[in-house]
Amino acid sequence: MMTAPVSVAAPARSELLAGLFPLGVCASESRLPIGRESLYVEEAQAVGGASAKRASEFATGRLCARQVLAELGVYGFPLRRNVDRSPRWPGGIVGSITHTVGFCGAVAVEQRRFAGLGVDAEVTSRVTAELWCQILTAAEKSALEDRAQEDRAWRAAAIFSAKESFFKAQWPLTSRWIGFEEVEIELYPDVGDEHLGTFLVRPHSTARRGIFPFDAYAGRFRLDGNLVVTGIALEKAPVFP
């Protein structure tokens, strides 16, 4: 049975995240931690034995989700977990949640408009060169090596984040885990602003091309201080078999 959570400061509408998506996608963010006491009982069950840090990340994400659901006219909806640990959004709505150090956000939209959403945020310094061999393809690493040293860190974080966004968006449609080596990211900055632009996701392996009928899927990226955010919306038209 749903129990009303403790009242806390609500997350704010996020222009940063909203700018990654077409008009109509609702976005919320919080840069302050929120305690587990803000959760509905049904939500709190998912982090009953978690550390205070993990429970706070989970709670902040749920409150961001609560904010975007309210914008869509949905109130008092406990966002439970599916068996695969993904958020169980209300019927007719698709959404995505992200959290990293000092930032949490959520996006949502009516399913009649888009089949899937993915959003991700990463602190640039956390995507270190030691991780590149795990998250980047040979072509992605080569593209970074051609860049000035000061550009490599944020671009590596943007590539990693773009993959995470795409993985989140496609998961409810395919239920397929995809390795970092199985998709390739290309970054295309906007004219006049290298830190804002479009990314293309290209299925990289022959096996994955059987799942994704299009050669590429487009999303948006932005560098905001030491934070990289990415987002992608998959069209409602049948994209996946």
Image (cartoon, helix red, strand yellow):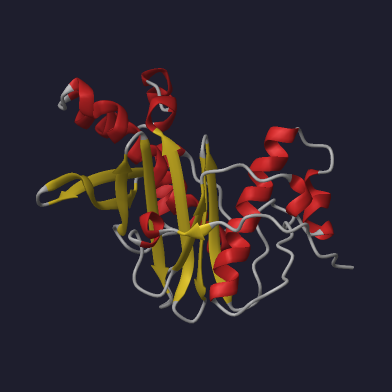
Where, by quadrant of the figure, is residue 180 drawn? Answer: top left
User: At 18% from the left edge and 48% from the top edge, which residue is drawn?
Assistant: 189
Q: Residue furthest left?
A: 192
Q: Residue 174, how many percent across, how many down?
A: 54, 61
Query: Can residue 205 be seen by looking at this rendering?
Result: no
Which corner quadrant holds the N terminus? Answer: bottom right
Q: Residue at x 27, y 51 (%)?
A: 199
- Image position, residue 119 (x, y; %): 46, 53
Residue 75 is left or right of residue 165, and the answer is: right
Q: Is residue 219 above or below residue 2?
A: above
- Whole-percent x and y of residue 167? 48, 51
- Farthest residue toward the top? 130
Name above or below for residue 79 compared with residue 205. below
> Vertical placement of 220 versus 24: above or below?
above
Q: Quadrant of residue 23?
A: bottom left
The residue sitting at 34% across, 59% down in the picture is: 20
